Amino acid sequence: MAMINGTDHILPGLHKLVQVLDTAVANRSPAHAYAGVCTALPLLVGDAQIQLPAFAWRPHPEHYARHELYCSREHGYCVVAMVWAPGQATPLHDHDGSWCVEAVWSGQLEVTYWHLLQADDDTGWRFAQGARQHQRAGDCSGLLAS
């Protein structure tokens, strides 16, 4: 197990979190791993045995913060706590072919989806704003790259 400050003492319930996520992704295609994590993550959010450490709640004063909690070398996934202070946002971005699943642990989050209209390094990139999704604690969504 490789983790920053990696013990159950630092992140109570780490063993349970890792066991559930390992089961969700082990020996599965990206699509099946994605589906497994989408199913498991909302249940983990509500589990009182799993408590995020104090550093995982700290926002950055100028932009959203990312705090790595765990990385599995065996299964190739990471658990990252992302924190936004009120009014902060994440710039328009893609995931470069990687899949991800996010769950709101506390508070609420507004996610705006974008559709690529034009991709040309010479003439520019254009996007159209898509649907907005409001998420609350326990809600889960993600991105499965095709």
Image (spheres, rainbow, N blue to C red):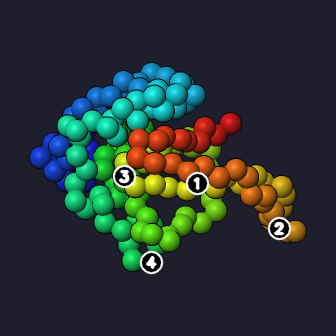
Give the Cα distance between marks 4 and 1.
19 Å
Image location of residue 70, percent across then percent down? 31, 46
> Which residue is label 1 attached to?
111
Residue, x 62% and y 44% (percent of image)?
97
Amino acid type shown at disc 4: Glu
Question: CA–CA distance between discs 4 and 3?
Answer: 20 Å
Name the residue type under label 1: Val
69 versus 22 height, above or below:
below
Few, some or many C-alpha atoms within 10 Å of disc 4 (few <14, some 14-19, many ≥20)? few
The quadrant of the image that shows the C terminus is top right
Which residue in the protein does label 3 denote? 106
Label 4 vs 3, first from the N-terminus: 4
Of mark 4 and mark 1, the one earlier in the sequence is 4
Name the residue: 62% across, 59% down: 93
Secondary structure, mark 4, is: loop
* Image position, residue 96 (x, y; %): 62, 50
Q: Amino acid at mark 2?
A: Gly
